[in-house]
């Protein structure tokens, strides 16, 4: 999951999980010349065209797999730069990427998956993609190599895999699991943006390929320390300062080519890619705040937008000329997270209960979501989307009726009981974000009647590595999680963190811990039966409501709009976002 932050091993979403150059006007690109050869002579070269997309946050890392950098702002840029064995298709479901390689389950007991990387697969610097890259994926995401040596957004699934027994140069390898794992096809294997160049990590760590392989297999923390340090922070980039090309090789149809700080990043066709070349030569991602994106589309500055919808914005788009608009549902919901850090007042359950009682969830939905989605209701659980067939059963099991409606008097009484009348609550979120600002205003008004003093603590750097969310400088956090249909995608969000630090807590931003939830999540991840999954999720949700870990608010309606001269634009309901197939985008 990624934060929107939209996130991969579930994801959070903050601005809207997560996760260059001044963009050329998409409208001025025209159709461009297609420089391909004669029919039958092989794939056509990319058309000399630039298509421009926009996102509200600026990329900050080439590696979006760490706890600090797992966010939509990175993922939407990198998923066709760094490829893998699978991706989320336009239905939000796991689909194999046969250009990268193939895989097959060969045993259920023990669960065994045989993988084969395409013999032609190479990094854009000519280095083969092979065993050392797979071992880096395993070392960085399994949690089995050193205590917190590698920063990861979550180990779910990978921690069950034995160290792959491959040798330098091998394209074939096996994942053997110690236990059954329901989402082995997605969460367990390296997918889009998951696989990083091990030869770069090894070199930066002062190791040869063989030394790196040996160190991973022997789990030699000391030998891997410098390499892990680079993996964790060496790909973090300051605005406009694109890393040297040798440090950021591509394994996909695009590579990063130019970055203008605060403006845009440009992806250019990777001429070393072994698969089908992208349809157009350049894709530019412009960094434009939410409330300016519609105007940018209307002005021809960008071709594609995915803003958080609201009634006025939707009306604007539907009346615009030359624009195609698509709405729908998606695996993305907004919520409030409490800070469980022992130094925070909300580590006290009575205060969490008091605040939960005064949050006007229905009023928020009626004012901000229903005008564009007439059947919208407050989201009553966290880990199943309202359009999922299991939703009603999970809601019933969650037993959250006590919080279905605000109880101002009950909140006031609890606040008085704890002696905290007039308590100041810093409600943090990423700005600018018009809808979330309105959410904060509605909460401040309602909870003010109960005796809380809610402070709008929105900040532009809320999702940054040193921002308030990562460093627990918040009382309550408002953001979104972007996920998928995978049942294991949200596991790290509620699993006990190794430490309440940016690298130690993964997706568990509030640092919540309950051994019973840990046990149920582990059981859920090993369960294949859909009805049993629903029962286990319901039990987890019941405990999460008892503990008042987070307050789910609403499922975000999906909204995409693009210049109507574009083709092959396919919105995606998962954390992958609309950029999942950017290499197929074209202009008529």
Image: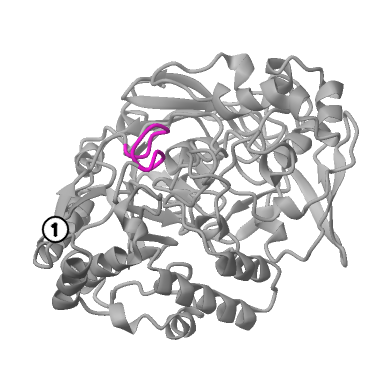
Residue 85 locus on image (x, y percent) = 71, 47
Q: Is residue 320 left or right of residue 50?
A: left
Quadrant where the image shows the C terminus: top left
Q: Is residue 356 above or below residue 288?
A: below
Between 112 and 398, which is closer to the camera in this rendering? 398
**Residue at left 49%, top 37%?**
68
The image's colouring method is one colour
Q: Is residue 495 left or right of residue 73?
A: right
Q: Which residue is mark 1?
A: 444
Residue 442 locus on image (x, y percent) = 14, 61
- The local crowd at label 1, few if under 14, some if 14 to 19, many if 20 or more residues have their Cα within 10 Å, is many
Q: Of helix, strand and loop, which mostly describes the magenta segment? A: loop
Membership of 468 in magenta stretch:
yes
Q: Which residues are magenta?
A: 462-472
Quadrant in the rendering for residue 583: top right
**Residue at left 60%, top 22%?**
248
Quadrant in the rendering for residue 42: top right
**Residue at left 64%, top 35%?**
150
Quadrant in the rendering for residue 208: top right
């Amino acid at each position: 999951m990624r934060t929107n932050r939209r996130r991969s091993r579930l994801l959070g979403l903050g601005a809207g999980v997560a996760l260059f150059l001044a963009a050329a006007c998409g409208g001025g690109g025209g159709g461009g010349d297609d420089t391909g050869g004669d029919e039958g002579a092989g794939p056509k070269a990319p058309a000399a065209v630039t298509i421009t997309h926009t996102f509200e946050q600026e990329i900050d890392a080439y590696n979006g797999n760490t706890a600090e950098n797992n966010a939509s702002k990175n993922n939407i840029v990198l998923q066709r730069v760094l490829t893998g064995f699978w991706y989320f298709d336009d239905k939000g479901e796991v689909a194999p990427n046969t250009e990268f390689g193939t895989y097959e389950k060969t045993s259920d007991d023990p669960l065994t998956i045989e993988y084969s990387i395409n013999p032609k697969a190479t990094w854009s610097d000519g280095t083969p993609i092979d065993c050392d890259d797979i071992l880096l994926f395993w070392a960085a995401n399994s949690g089995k190599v050193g205590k917190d040596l590698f920063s990861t957004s979550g180990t779910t699934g990978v921690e069950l895999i034995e160290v792959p027994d491959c040798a330098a140069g091998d394209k074939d390898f096996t994942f053997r699991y110690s236990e059954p794992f329901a989402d082995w096809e997605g969460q367990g294997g390296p997918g889009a943006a998951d696989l990083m160049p091990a030869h770069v990590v090894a070199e930066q760590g002062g190791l040869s390929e063989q030394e790196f392989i040996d160190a991973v297999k022997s789990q030699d923390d000391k030998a891997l320390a410098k390499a892990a340090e680079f993996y964790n922070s060496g790909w973090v980039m300051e605005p406009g300062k694109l890393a040297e090309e040798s440090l950021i090789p591509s394994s996909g149809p695009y590579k990063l080519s130019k970055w203008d700080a605060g403006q845009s990043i440009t992806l250019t066709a990777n001429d070393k890619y072994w698969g089908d070349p992208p349809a157009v030569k350049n894709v530019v991602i412009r960094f434009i705040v939410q409330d300016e994106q519609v105007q940018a589309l209307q002005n021809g500055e960008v071709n594609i937008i995915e803003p958080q919808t609201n009634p006025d914005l939707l009306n604007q788009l539907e009346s615009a000329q030359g624009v195609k608009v698509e709405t729908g549902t998606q695996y993305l919901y907004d919520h409030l997270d409490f800070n469980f850090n022992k130094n925070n007042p909300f580590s006290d359950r009575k205060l969490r209960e008091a605040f939960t009682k005064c949050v006007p969830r229905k009023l928020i939905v009626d004012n901000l979501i229903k005008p564009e989605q007439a059947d919208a209701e407050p989201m009553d659980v966290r880990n199943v989307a309202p359009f999922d067939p299991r939703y009603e059963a999970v809601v019933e099991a969650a037993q959250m009726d006590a919080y279905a409606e605000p109880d101002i008097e009950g909140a006031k009484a609890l606040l008085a009981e704890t002696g905290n009348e007039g308590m100041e609550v810093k409600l943090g979120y990423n700005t600018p974000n018009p809808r979330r600002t309105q959410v904060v205003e509605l909460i401040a008004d309602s909870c003010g009647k109960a005796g809380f003093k809610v402070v709008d603590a929105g900040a532009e750097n809320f999702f940054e590595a040193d921002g308030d969310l990562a460093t627990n400088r918040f009382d309550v956090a408002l953001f979104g999680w972007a996920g998928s249909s995978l049942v294991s995608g949200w596991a790290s969000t509620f699993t006990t963190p190794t430490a309440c630090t940016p690298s130690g807590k993964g997706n568990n931003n509030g640092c919540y811990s309950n051994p019973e939830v840990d046990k149920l999540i582990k059981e859920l991840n090993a369960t294949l039966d859909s009805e049993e999954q629903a029962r286990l999720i319901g039990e987890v949700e019941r405990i999460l409501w008892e503990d008042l870990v987070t307050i789910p608010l609403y499922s975000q309606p999906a909204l995409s709009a693009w210049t109507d001269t574009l083709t092959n634009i396919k919105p995606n309901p998962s954390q992958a976002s609309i950029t999942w197939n950017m290499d197929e985008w074209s202009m008529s």
